[in-house]
Amino acid sequence: MKKDKLKLEIERAWINEKGKWSKNPFIKDKICHVIDLLEKGSIRVSECLNEKWIVHEWIKQAIVMFFSIKKMNVIEFGSLEFYDKIPVKNKFKEKGIRVVPPAIARYGSYISPGVVLMPSYVNIGSYIGMDTMVDTWATVGSCAQIGNRVHISGGVGIGGVLEPIQSYPVIVEDDVFIGSRCILVEGVLIEKGAVLGANVVLTSSTKIFDTTKDKTVEMKGFIPKYSVVIPGSYPKKFPSGVIYYVPCALIIGKRKDSTNKKVSLNEALRTHKIVV
């Protein structure tokens, strides 16, 4: 079925068949087809078109409907037992993906060839680009979009945004380095080549200060290309009259747009004394 027709069927079911999806074999088939396409990487929840990221709401709708039509099942792997609605990915050897036990990726996520999954978790609807490293105890939330050659360090939490349907997921573009224990949630965008030091926390409301200008620039929701970022704090006066220090992120430099990404990364880390 062509994507435009499939999109129309999903949108129609979302509005007209709400709560009755599991009782309609035709709709169930269309929902499962969308998840199969996500699994194969044929479609994505979000993609960059003409240098602007867009969200395909109908795909997120299909994921929500998929949860409602699936039944709980026992999933066994040797002596390990799980009880869930959604199966896990398999056949990693054929897909060219290195998976270190006990890494888990849910069916309906797409993982590109060359990816390394250390013991970690990847949720449904997410997309991981080629040659990306997902290090130990990192999580990639539902619908999160991760680019090529991204390094997700140990303990990083990349949140998923499945609902509200119209909301952007967390998006990490190509060649980004995310330091240990960073938290990225609420649809933040990390643009190409950025370097995030350890413990940077970004939400949609987190203040981001670019300190590299003559005058500090404040922004929210995204990190510009090739930025080098560390965690910081700023004073805020509360109604009680007490001033507390609130977390923020500080852009302290720029990573060079070099063809040798590894060399430019190491240089950025040394130059700005970044803890990763």
Image (cartoon, rainbow, N blue to C red):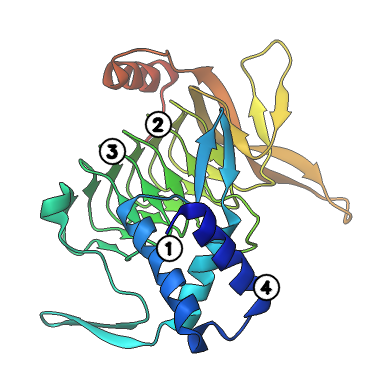
Give the image location of residue 25, x and y in percent: 45, 83
Mark 3 and 4 residues: CB-CB less than 8 Å, in contact?
no
Closer to the eye: label 3 or 4: 4
Vertical relation: 57 (above or below) 199: below
Q: Report the Cα–Cα distance between label 1 and label 3.
A: 22 Å
Q: Which residue is mark 4?
A: 15
Measured in 3D between alpha carbons, the distance from the residue under mark 2 to the one under mark 1, in whole angstroms, is 25 Å
On residue 130, the disc is: 3
| Helix, strand or loop at mark 1 | helix
Of residue 90 and residue 229, the one placed in the foreground of this image is 90
Helix or strand or loop: what does disc 3 sit on? loop
Direction from residue 216 to residue 38 in the image, left or right: left
Vertical placement of residue 231 versus 217, above or below: below
x, y percent for residue 264: 34, 16
Q: CA distance from mark 3 to mark 2?
A: 9 Å
The kind of residue tagged 3 is: Met
| Residue holding disc 1 | 34
Image position, residue 103 (x, y; %)? 24, 61
- Residue 174 - label: 2
> Which residue sits at x=33%, y=58%?
39
Mark 3 or mark 2: name the one nearer the start of the chain: 3
